[in-house]
């Protein structure tokens, strides 16, 4: 469970899972102080980090010589009916084309990607 608590600064928010904290804030043009990630960026963080971890887990499971993964994600909301996560992946290591293809296909089953591909809804609960 994630808990967000407002800070004394205008829109600065302390976000925690009980063990770790992340600062989330609005940009200056929206009245924030830019002291942390913007909420929109947290969606990009979730996708990029999940893809990165998932590829590394898959490589480890398959015994592939992957040394490093760099994932970049941006969320494009310019088209009203949909939001598009655009991403790139850089694989480093002594991987042949077949191994690279296997790892790139693994992205399709990344847990956060699979979650976001579903119909999403919101349900208010006064007790969590």
Image (cartoon, rainbow, N blue to C red):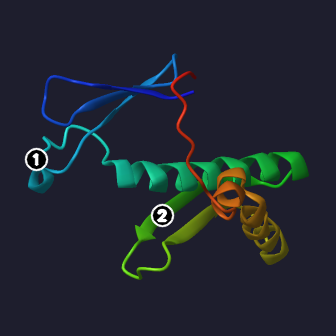
Callout 1 crowding tier (Cα within 10 Å): few <14, some 14–19, many ≥20: few
- Which residue of the protein is positioned furthest toward the right in this rendering? 62
Q: Nearer the viewer, mark 2 or mark 1?
A: 1
Above or below, comparing residue 66 to residue 72 in the picture: above
Above or below, comparing residue 89 to residue 5 in the picture: below
Q: Nearer the viewer, residue 65 or 18?
A: 18
Left or right: 124 with respect to 99?
left
Give the residue pinned by disc 2.
Answer: 73
> Which quadrant is home to the C terminus?
top right
Give the residue pinned by disc 1.
Answer: 31
Residue 33 point in image, percent of width and height: 13, 41
What whole-number distance in Å separates the C-alpha atoms at marks 2 and 1?
Answer: 25 Å
Residue drawn at (83%, 55%) of the image = 64
Find numbered disc 1 in the image and state the secondary structure of the residue it sits on. loop
Residue 90 point in image, percent of width and height: 58, 66
> Which quadrant is home to the N terminus?
top right
Left or right: 49 with respect to 81?
right
Can residue 68 be seen at all in this image of the molecule?
no
């Amino acid at each position: 469970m994630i808990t967000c608590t407002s800070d004394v600064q205008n829109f600065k928010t302390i976000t925690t899972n009980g063990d770790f904290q992340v600062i989330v804030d609005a940009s200056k043009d929206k009245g924030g102080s830019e002291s942390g990630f913007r909420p929109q960026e947290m969606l990009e963080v979730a996708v990029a980090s999940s893809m990165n971890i998932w590829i590394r887990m898959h490589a480890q499971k398959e015994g592939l010589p992957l040394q490093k993964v760099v994932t970049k994600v941006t969320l494009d909301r310019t088209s009203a009916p949909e939001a598009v996560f655009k991403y790139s992946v850089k694989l480093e290591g002594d991987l042949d084309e077949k191994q690279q293809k296997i790892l790139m296909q693994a992205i399709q089953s990344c847990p956060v990607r699979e979650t976001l591909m579903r119909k999403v809804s919101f349900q208010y609960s006064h007790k969590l």
